[in-house]
Image (cartoon, helix red, strand yellow):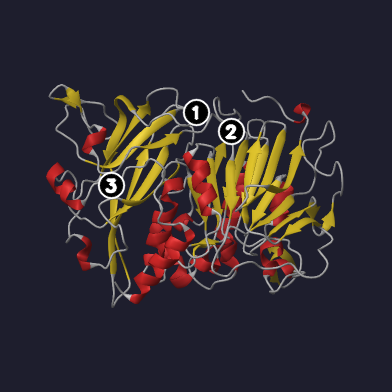
Amino acid sequence: MGAGAGFLLAAAAAAGLLAAAPGAAAARPAAAAAAAGGGGGWGGGAGGGSRAPPGAGPVEQLRTAYGDDPARGFRAAWSSRDASAPSGWAVWRRAGAGLPGHPLVAAGEPVTFGGAQVRRHSEGVLDANVQWLLTARADGLEPDTDYVYAVGCRFGNAEGGGAGGGGAWDGRPAVRPEDCLSALHTFTTAPRPGELPGRKPLRVAVYGDMGVKNGRSLPRLKALAAAENLTAVMHVGDLAYNMWEDSGRRSDVFLEGVSPVAANVPYHVCPGNHESFRDFAEYRARFDGTMPNQGPGAMWHGFDLGPVHFVMFSSEVFFYSSRHGWGLVPAQHRWMRQHLAAVDRTKTPWLVTMAHRPMYCSPNDDLDDCHERHSLVRNGLPLPFKFNKLGYEELLQEFRVDLHVGAHEHSYERTWPVFRGKVGGKGAGAYDTPAGHDWLGKTVHLVAGAAGCRENTDPWLGKPGHFSATRLNGYGFGLLSASRTELAFEQVDHATGEVVDSFTITKPASAFAEAD
């Protein structure tokens, strides 16, 4: 084992990144894949001689995200070192009540199955890290329904089989869980837009800046996922620290480490500055094609989740002179305007946007964009005779965005409702919308970059900004929940689980029409 891999293993063990999910079965070894039959190998030698991370095999780094219609489908992505391993996938209804603690059991025949899209990926030159990246799209599912799925599946010669089929041969289903290399994992489709989950509360984990080393929040996130107490995860940039290091093996260790969460809970991402190396190459390789309604290279995407519409976009377009940096400034802004304009607020009354670099933050020990009077993310490009060109705060105002989440600063801060530096109200009632109005008039901003990374925390210094309601220095992550009249947020301490800050934005029922 090289020095780089040894460092990664030690760092991952210290952060709990290599711990297995409670009750999860390990993937079968490569020899078992050969015994199970080919059924979809994709060429080349097994691993190509790559020095793989510990535990690497025919299925690793498994993760999910919602599909283009989150109520009807999802996407699964994984990696393999074994070029001869089967590349199929299958989805079954989950047997039983689907309550926390209920065993993962497939009910009957698969409701959909197929072969994954496969890409060979090689990072590094002198010590190449070669693997195959696989992506599956499961569509045509039922809203707010519990499913189980497996990947690395071998199919038989089913009549009427193929992607989306349910055929059988020799009197048995076209594919069974035991025909797959992975363990069974669970996935729950989203409710229809505007509706709430029928059996479990809507609870979304929100954070940025979590890496392999010092990933303080991961153990508690794993516990929430294992107890089936998370609906989705939003990782607001800066993954792994840094994805490209050690020929991309940092990505391998990170994605394998978060897999106990991400294999069972939709894990959504947007890029941060730590993904920018070589025009975001490693980020794009791992996530392109895995986010719903996405832009090029998964730089932006948006989707409905119950009464909330989420948008994740790239703040990094302003800071890098590359194709996926400056080259996307006009395109992303144009997409954002069109996307926000299409949101049906009678169905999804809450609109939440996220990008890595925040628009507002109090003084700390650096000189980031959010400290500037003219912030690029907030105000846009300072072109001659045209300020506020292609900035995002004007869009938040125009389309009545309720909450905007940034990260980047390794700490936590919550603002009062604010627009162009002017605060809409402070103290009790500041987040309550008056009856007869459907919006506060100004967006609440969060800095949520305290999940834990090798750069530790960014302590706040001096007096808070005039817009600041609360600022904290400890490690932790957020939990967002929603009903049709309330959008609530809690910041959770990573070690104790204590809620260290909370707030609720309210809207009266009269502020919007009932969804159809």
First in sequence: mark 1 or mark 3? Answer: 3
Q: Secondary structure at mark 1?
A: loop
Quadrant (top left/top right/bottom left/bottom right) for the C terminus = top right
Percent position of residue 238, x then y: 53, 62
Q: Position of residue 287 (x, y in %)?
A: 42, 55
* Amino acid at pointer 2: Gly
| Residue at position x 38%, y 40% in the image | 23
Occupied quadrant, residue 8:
bottom left
Q: Quadrant of residue 455?
A: bottom right
Tell me the residue that label 1 is attached to: 144
- How far apart are the alpha carbons under marks 2 and 3? 33 Å
**Residue type indicated by callout 3:** Ala
Number of the label disc, if any, that sits on residue 306: 2
User: What's the CA distance linking mark 2 and mark 1?
Assistant: 10 Å
Secondary structure beneath disc 3? loop
- Give the structural element (helix, strand or loop) at label 2: loop
Q: Which residue is mark 3?
A: 27
